[in-house]
Amino acid sequence: MRPPVGVILAGGQATRMGGGDKGLLTLGDTTLLGHVMDRLRPQVADMALNANGDPARFAGLGLPVISDSIEGFAGPLAGVLAGLDWAAAQGAETIVTAAADTPFFPCDLVPRLQLAAEGMAHPLALAATPDPERGKARHPTFGLWPVALREDLRAALADGVRKVVMWTDRHDGRLAMFPDEAAFFNVNTPDDLARAEAMQ
């Protein structure tokens, strides 16, 4: 399987953080986005940032900034579609997505996702961790997505599908299990940012 390209999802509105770009918040000696970029870059062939609004605020990152083609903040699936469209223009076959507010995700994210999707005609897998109550917890912003299904995803979004797992289940998406749930800790509130500082 050819290396995927990476797409960092930063298209949310960060309402619990008071708005603005969570990814640009400082964590240690860099930003949340800086941590995510450092973890994703060695695992992918190329990288882009999915964000809406004025791309100039991310100019210092040196990444292409791609916005949703679906209006009205349609959620992570809209960011996935934007990433698939960008990847198609690069000649890539798959993308791996990572959330901009999850600074400690696994350094073996990509190979584990690829392993989970091995043998699929259209590789599609989400990250998951054990959950004592539900058995497993899916992390739908961390996934391997096939460019070949982008028109299907576009049609699903046009039909009102917004839940990631509703679409991935439709295509028999698989799960890549990761042992450490804390690896997918994401920063939603100022308290979460303080916790992330302590976790470094």
Image (cartoon, rainbow, N blue to C red):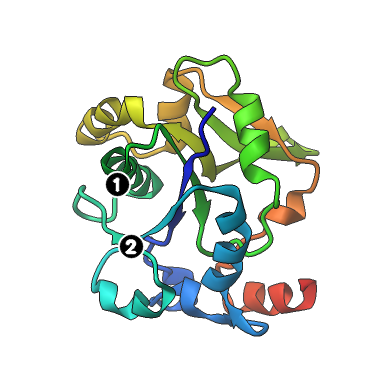
Indicate the secondary structure of the residue bearing disc 1.
Answer: helix
Q: In the image shown, does 170 or 44 lie closer to the viewer?
A: 44
Residues at discs 2 and 1 in contact (Cβ within 8 Å): yes
Work out whether mark 2 precedes mark 1 in sequence or the reverse, and give the earlier one. Answer: 2
Q: Which residue is mark 2?
A: 64
Q: Measured from the top left, where is residue 13 in percent x and y? A: 37, 66
Q: In the image shown, does 9 or 136 lie closer to the viewer?
A: 9
Instruction: Name the residue rendered at 29%, 38% in the picture.
Output: 88
Instruction: Name the residue rendered at 67%, 59% in the picture.
Output: 185
Instruction: Name the residue rendered at 52%, 16% in the picture.
Output: 120
Instruction: Name the residue rendered at 42%, 19% in the picture.
Output: 170
Q: In this picture, is 115 found above or below 20?
A: above
Could you classify mark 1 by the number of other residues whose Cα lies within 10 Å: few (under 14), some (14-19), or many (20 or more)? Answer: many
Which label was assigned to residue 86? 1
- Residue 72 shown left or right of residue 189 in the figure: left
- Give the CA separation, mark 2 to mark 1: 9 Å
Q: Measured from the top left, where is residue 73 in percent x and y? A: 28, 55
Q: In this picture, is 71 found above or below 186?
A: above
Q: Amino acid at mark 2?
A: Pro
